[in-house]
Image (cartoon, rainbow, N blue to C red):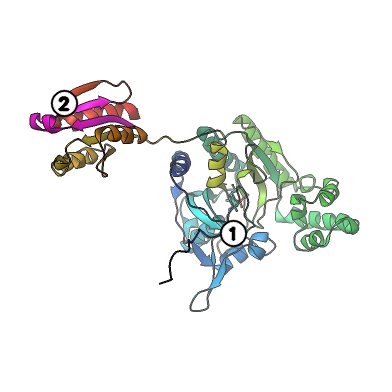
Amino acid sequence: MSEGGRRVAAPRGTRDVLPPESALRQRVIDVARDAFERYGYSRVVTPTFEETEVFVRGVGTSTDVVRKEMYTFPDQSGRSLSLRPEGTAPVVRAFVQHGMHKLPLPVKLWYVAPMFRYEAPQAGRYREHWQVGAEAIGSDDPLLDAEVIALLAGIYRRLEVPGVRLRLGSMGDPKSRGPYRAKLVEYLEGRLPALGEDARERMRVNPLRLFDTKDPRVAEVMAEAPKLIDHLSPAAQEHRERVNDALGRLGIAFDEDPTLVRGFDYYTMTVFEFTSDHLGAQSAVGGGGRYDGLVEGLGGPPTPGVGFGAGIERIVLALESQGAVVAPAIDCYLAVMEPGLRPELLPLLEALRAAGLRCESDLRGRSLKSMMRHAASLGARHVLIVGAREHEEGVATVRDMESGEQRSLPLGDLVTELSVHAGEAGA
Ligand code: HAM
């Protein structure tokens, strides 16, 4: 053991989620789960770490995530493993491994899971973050792209995430991207002096990423650069128009953004990002797109797919910026005035909980006054007061914390009476 005394903190870029934030976070997950179920998604759980190759082949060697941000380590037998930096490649790996292409398509899977990226921490950017995500694998229908976008838009709407906007782009298909890329490089090579060393390096690795630059000089160059959206193949162009049309019919507003480049190599055709203007620089609350070559890239039969991931911490930050909190609430608080009676009333407390009521009681020897304060701070609807007199008569004084009304009820009726009230509150 150490000498003790030094406080240990959570690792840089990670955070503890404490109440009441944890309740808001749970609400995000509950709303997402409910939406996933209504759209026909089933939950998938994949390991927290994968063979590094899953991400090298799946996410791609030109991406910052694979080049610089992975938590990669050899295990004791020398196998290279990586903590999951994103959720799509692992889900597709599982789809291929378990021959899920034989199931009725598209297979729709959702997840809630932590992701690990060695990024520079700042507000809204962590080294461990959580995503809720969905992957629909096995259809290239543009209506599926629109459905996936509508699903995510519905989650933000239901949560009332403030200032949400949708940006839409297209990565084209690999056939149209090759010649376009050559055009872009040619354009950039004529402007090398305006690009720094960093931008020149990016140009060699993946010139499209330069659209994502924070450097104003590079941004100026990119503003005039040829755009992929103007060089789409007829098939990619038609796909784009049909997605736009479907979103229009659904009344989902979007901005087409020819500079939207998402940070993974697997994207084809539709890409999208939702932002909230209530966040700082890290404003993306979710993003995704189509990945028609990924299943094949990971060893499966050619199978298209589309999906998204949404950052839970950023959604919570956006909600908190509006003062959102999930107030604590319990159905009843048992206030036993005689400490000696507490063991005898323990079965009553258990019976209330077994009936599905959320019940608390004092475990610190509080006075009645202090128990009432405690009950209020827990958001109790009712307080059940039992003193020597009540105990003798086999009753409890039930106080409605909202109206302040009090009445006497037989102990045997409490479960039924309070369940009716809890049912009303939940309705
Ligand atoms: P992504 O855009 O890298 O996409 O991440 C999705 C969301 O996770 C982001 O929009 C953001 O809300 C959140 N996020 C990402 N990095 C961080 C971070 N360091 N700290 C806090 N939040 C973060 C993907 O991961 C793709 N797998 C999405 C996808 C699914 N595409 C197709 N299917």
Residue at point 70%, 42% (across, down): 238
- Residue that carries the numbered disc 2 in the rendered image: 409
Q: Provide the residue span drawn in magenta.
A: 379-400
Q: Secondary structure at mark 2?
A: strand
Tag 2: residue type?
Leu
Image quarter of the C terminus: top left
Q: Quadrant of residue 162?
A: top right
In this rendering, is residue 420 above or below 132? above
- Residue that carries the numbered disc 1 in the rendered image: 117
Q: Does residue 102 show up magenta in the picture? A: no
In front here: 268 or 425? 425
- In the image, residue 331 lies at what x, y percent? 29, 33
Tag 1: residue type?
Arg
Q: Is mark 1 within 8 Å of ligand 1?
A: yes
Q: Quadrant of residue 166?
A: top right
Side of 378 relative to 410 (left or right): right
Residue at point 54%, 46% (across, down): 313
Q: Which label lies toward us, 1 or 2? A: 2
- In the image, residue 31 lies at what x, y percent? 46, 39
